Amino acid sequence: MRVLLTGAFGNIGSYVLAELLRRGHEVRAFALDTPADRERAKQFQNLTDVRWADITDADAVESAVDDMDVVLHFAAMIPPASEADPALARAINVDGTANVIAACQAQAVAPRLMFASTFDVHGNTLDKEPPRQIDDPFDAIDDYSAHKIECEALVKTSGLECFVPRFADVPLIALRKAEPIMFEIGLKNRIEVLHPIDAALAVANALEVDEVWGKTLFIGGGASCQVTYREFLTRIMGAMGLRLPPEAAFADKPYATDWVDTAESERLLRYQQRDFDAITSDIAALLGPRRYVMPLVRPFVQRSILRLSPYWPAARAG
């Protein structure tokens, strides 16, 4: 199958790319020409068709869509970058998606279009009984979620044969650098995670399951991947040899995370193969020999992380 994959070297996209190539699909990768993506592209030695271009370039997008059977659209600007530059984020997220739709519509035989969406479109739902259902109301709480809501509408009214997966949280399998946003999530929030390999399985399997086309489905890890943010962060940081910062360093407010109903997506796509332990084990494996020095440097690393919290100075003073 001839497949165009936008955002091909992103967190989910890179795993999707690997799975598509493994299955023998003819993949055309579309990505912004950055040093980071150039470096990631070196992993895929059997990838022969890469379009280094900007999703906001309508002509480049139309050229890339030409003669494709299916388009998998992952290219997006996500938080916190999307909230720091809303105008650029809109150009990438909304206008870029409009370019993809127009390019598909311009083909003599329109390809199928999969648009990667997110649970974030439902906003803060901590006050509701889980799990969330796919027909729960939208609630745009930031620019990113507003963009995704708008794009879902564009896709669904495009006349194209489409599939809209709304992904739960897909953590990086990496030794992540701490960011201030980690402290903006209340520790009581529910969060459902999904291993990126399983995310890729869901996408690749969708190419072979006609029943998903025309649907919107949650894609999440299932019951074994449903945790609180406290447990999520404790175990992710533990995998890196670190400890959870004090509770007072965190905001006490809801965030756009929750457990979701994946019964239908799992029935159709059979992708839930890895539990939360697999995610933390894969992250821990990346430490390598550094695990032996972590006890020595842990106090310094912990203090540097705690300094990122906007809530900790007042809590400590109090």
Image: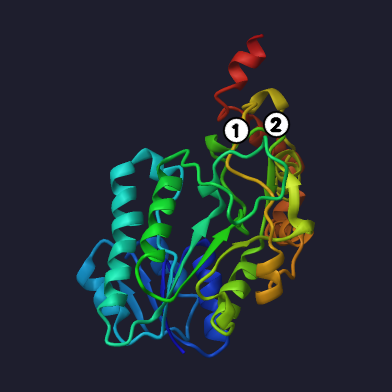
Residue at point 70%, 61% (across, down)? 221
Residue 65 placement: quadrant: bottom left
Q: Is residue 278 left or right of residue 88?
A: right
Residue placed farthest to the top in the image?
A: 318
User: Residue 82: where, in percent of width, then height?
Assistant: 39, 45
User: Given this view, does label 2 or label 1 mark the residue nearer the observer?
Assistant: 1
User: Residue 246: where, in percent of width, then height?
Assistant: 72, 27
Q: Secondary structure at mark 2?
A: loop
User: Residue 128: where, in percent of width, then height?
Assistant: 68, 39
Q: Earlier in the sequence, mark 2 or mark 1?
A: 1
In front here: 148 or 31? 148
In the rendered view, would you say 245 is above or below 53?
above
- Where the C terminus falls, by quadrant? top right
Q: Which residue is mark 2?
A: 245
Q: Which residue is mark 1?
A: 183
Q: CA distance from mark 2 to mark 1?
A: 9 Å
In front here: 125 or 312? 125
In the rendered image, is residue 293 in sight?
Answer: no
Q: Are marks 2 and 1 in contact (CB under 8 Å)?
A: yes
Q: Disc 1 marks which amino acid?
A: Phe
Q: Secondary structure at mark 1?
A: helix
Q: Is residue 293 left or right of residue 101?
A: right
In front here: 64 or 108? 108
Q: Specify few, some or many for label 2: CA neighbours under 10 Å numbering under 14, 14-19, or 20 or more.
A: some
Q: Disc 2 marks which amino acid?
A: Pro
